[in-house]
Amino acid sequence: MKLRISLLVLAVLVNSQFMLAQAKEGNGPERVKAEVLKRGTGEKARVKVKLRNGSEVRGYISKADQDTFDIHGKNNANVTLAYADVLSVRKPGMSRGAKIGIAAGGAALVIAALAARAIASLGP
């Protein structure tokens, strides 16, 4: 009985992870277009764009049209991308979760060092 319940729980977990991965991949052209329009254009609209073919383009959004948008990258090169070819549009740099993780790790290190020092001062 425990084996059946364990297998059922495992199957549900695997299925939910599979569905979550599909939902994340499902960034359709409408969602990409909304993200581009939300960021606007100009040098302050810096983005990191992941394409469906696996490549990545970094720069700022210089122009956004109905079906395409332009990224102005290094060496003054403009790249025109179709919304359908784009997997995701994000700000460059670390995510908020990564920054929180680094801060939490640093705080844990400081607390551990203070605790070790307090324990050492209680010595014989």
Image (cartoon, rainbow, N blue to C red):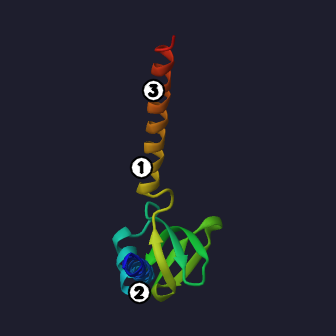
How crowded pointer 1 is (Cα within 10 Å; few <14, some 14-19, many 20+) is rated as: few
Camera-near label (3 vs 2) is 3
Residue 103 versus residue 2: which sits nearer the camera? 2
Q: Amino acid at mark 1?
A: Ile
**Residue type highlighted by circle 3:** Ala
Mark on residue 48? none
Q: Earlier in the sequence, mark 1 or mark 3?
A: 1
Give the residue displayed 62% in from the left and 72% down from the top. Answer: 77
The mark total stands at: 3
Residue at 36 percent of width and 78 percent of height: 5
- Residue 89: x, y in percent? 46, 73
SS type, badge 2: helix
Q: Quadrant of residue 33?
A: bottom left
Image location of residue 43, percent across then percent down: 47, 62
Q: Earlier in the sequence, mark 3 or mark 2?
A: 2
Discs 1, 3 touching: Cβ within 8 Å: no
Please tell me which residue lies in front, 92 or 80. 92
| Marking on residue 29 | 2
Marks 3 and 2, how far apart at CA:
52 Å
For the residue carrying disc 3, how many other residues have a C-alpha within 10 Å: few (<14), some (14-19), or many (20+)? Answer: few
Q: Quadrant of residue 38?
A: bottom left
Residue density around tag 2, few if under 14, some if 14–19, many if 20 or more, within 10 Å: some
Residue 7 image offset from top left, x and y in percent:
42, 80
Query: CB atoms at circles 3 and 2 under 8 Å apart?
Result: no
| Residue 100 circle label | 1
The amino acid type found where label 2 is placed reads Pro
Residue designated by label 3 = 115
